[in-house]
C-alpha cells in the first residue's frame, strides 16, 4: 500500500528465518490452509531446495515438472508452474533440489536478486485472483531469501520457543533493513510467531517474555503449541487443518490466520 508504484494484487509474505527447524514450512503450509478456510485464495511458493512444503502437500517429486527454479529463471510463466493442492482455494509452486544451485548459477546475473520479484510482480496477477502468496524460504539468508524479501510486502518470522531463539534474529532484522534500503523500501515485518510452544516449560515462557519485551507488538498474540498432530500431518500429505481439524495445532493456525487478517483489515481501514 505504501508504494503506489506497486500494482494492486495479492499480499506477498515471506516466511523466513535463517535457522532450520523453527517451523517455517509448517507455518507456511498451515497458515496458507487456514487463510484458504477463511475464503482467501492462497498460493504457496516453495523456495526451499529441500522441497518440504511440496512434499508436505502431496506433490510427488515426479510431478514437479516445472518448479520455482524454472519460474525464477524465467523459463516458464506463473500459470504453467502453479499446481492445485488438495485444499480448496490453495495452490502451490513446488520446488526441487535444482534450486540449491541457483545461488551459484545466478552469481553473474545482474538481476539475480529480483528474479522472484519479476516473476510474481510483473505478471498480470488479476487473472489469478490470489489474495495471499506465502513464500516458504530456505534456512539461510542467501540469494533465495533475499529474492523472497524483495518480492514481498512483508516478512513473517517463526521463532521456535527454545534456548537461543532470539539469537540470529538481529541478523535477520539487519537483512530486512538492508533490503529496505536497497531494493524494497516498503518491506514490513508482518510479525513474529512463537512456534512449538510448550506452556508447561519454563523456557518457552521465558522466550515469550523476552520476545514480547524486546519486540513488543511485532509478536503475534497467537502462539503455536507443540502438537504431535502438526508433525504427523506432512506424512499424510495434508496441512494439520485437514489432517486433524480439531487438534490444538489446527486451532492455533486458524487463530493465527484470523489475527493476521484482522491486522490487514485494520491497516486498510
Ligand atoms: P523449518 O521449515 O523452519 O526448517 P519445519 O516447519 O520443517 O521447520 O519444522 C521442523 C520440524 O518440527 C518438523 O519435523 C515439523 O514437523 C516439526 N514441527 C513444527 N511445528 C511443530 C509443532 N507446532 N508441533 C510439533 N512439531 C512441529
Ligand atoms: Mg522448511
Image (cartoon, helix red, strand yellow):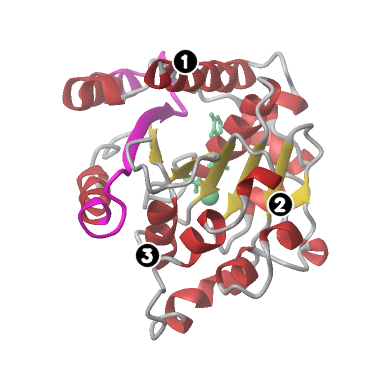
Q: Nearer the viewer, residue 188 or 102?
A: 188
Q: In the rendered image of this protein, does residue 19 appear above or below residue 195?
A: below
Q: Can residue 153 be found in the magenta stretch?
A: no
Q: Was residue 180 drawn as part of the magenta stretch in this picture?
A: yes
Disc 3 on helix, strand or loop? Answer: loop
User: Among all residues in the image, which is located at the extreme left?
Assistant: 214
Q: Which mark is residue 262?
A: 1
Find residue 85 and report its image quarter.
top right
Residue at 52% x, 72% y is 100
Q: Residue furthest front?
A: 4
Return the x and y of residue 225 as percentages of the image width and height.
50, 21
Q: Which numbered tag is attached to residue 142?
A: 3
For the residues labelled 3 and 2, the Cα–Cα distance comes to: 22 Å
Indicate which label's residue lies in the foreground, 3 or 1: 1
Q: Which residues are magenta?
A: 179-207
Residue sticking out furthest to the bottom: 108
Discs 3, 2 touching: Cβ within 8 Å:
no
**Residue 103 % position (x, y):** 44, 75
Q: CA distance from mark 2 to mark 1?
A: 30 Å
Q: Residues within 10 Å of mark 2 (few under 14, many from 20)?
A: many
Residue hosting label 2: 55
Q: Mark 1 or mark 2, which is nearer the start of the sequence?
A: 2
Mark 3 vs ligand 2: CB below 8 Å: no
User: Mark 2–mark 1 contact, CB under 8 Å?
Assistant: no
The answer to which quarter of the image holds residue 255 is top right
Expressed as whole percent of the image width and height from the top left, the position of residue 104 reads 43, 81
SS for dot 1 = helix
Front: mark 3 or 2: 3
Q: Quadrant of the N terminus?
A: top left
Amino acid at each position: 500500500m505504501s508504494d503506489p508504484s506497486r500494482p494492486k494484487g495479492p499480499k506477498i509474505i515471506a516466511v523466513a528465518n535463517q535457522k532450520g527447524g523453527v517451523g517455517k514450512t509448517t507455518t507456511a503450509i498451515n497458515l496458507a490452509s487456514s487463510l484458504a478456510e477463511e475464503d482467501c485464495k492462497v498460493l504457496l511458493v516453495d523456495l526451499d531446495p529441500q522441497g518440504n512444503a511440496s512434499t508436505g502437500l502431496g506433490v510427488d517429486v515426479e510431478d514437479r515438472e516445472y518448479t520455482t527454479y524454472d519460474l525464477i529463471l524465467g523459463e516458464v510463466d506463473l500459470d504453467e508452474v502453479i499446481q492445485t493442492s488438495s485444499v480448496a482455494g490453495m495452490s502451490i509452486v513446488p520446488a526441487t533440489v535444482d534450486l540449491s544451485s541457483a545461488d551459484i548459477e545466478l552469481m553473474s546475473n545482474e538481476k539475480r536478486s529480483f528474479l522472484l520479484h519479476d516473476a510474481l510482480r510483473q505478471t498480470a496477477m488479476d487473472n489469478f485472483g490470489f489474495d495471499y502468496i506465502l513464500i516458504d524460504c530456505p534456512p539461510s539468508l542467501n540469494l533465495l531469501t533475499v529474492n523472497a524479501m524483495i518480492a514481498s510486502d512483508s516478512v513473517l518470522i517463526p521463532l521456535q520457543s527454545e534456548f537461543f531463539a532470539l539469537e540470529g534474529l538481529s541478523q535477520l532484522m539487519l537483512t530486512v533493513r538492508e533490503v529496505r534500503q536497497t531494493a524494497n523500501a516498503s518491506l514490513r515485518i508482518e510479525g513474529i510467531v512463537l512456534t512449538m510452544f510448550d506452556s508447561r516449560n519454563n523456557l518457552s515462557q521465558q522466550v515469550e517474555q523476552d520476545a514480547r519485551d524486546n519486540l513488543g507488538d511485532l509478536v503475534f498474540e497467537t502462539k503455536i503449541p507443540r502438537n504431535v498432530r502438526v508433525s504427523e500431518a506432512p506424512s499424510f500429505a495434508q496441512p494439520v487443518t485437514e489432517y486433524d481439524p480439531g487438534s490444538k495445532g489446527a486451532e492455533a493456525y486458524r487463530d493465527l490466520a484470523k489475527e493476521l487478517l484482522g491486522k490487514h483489515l485494520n491497516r486498510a481501514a
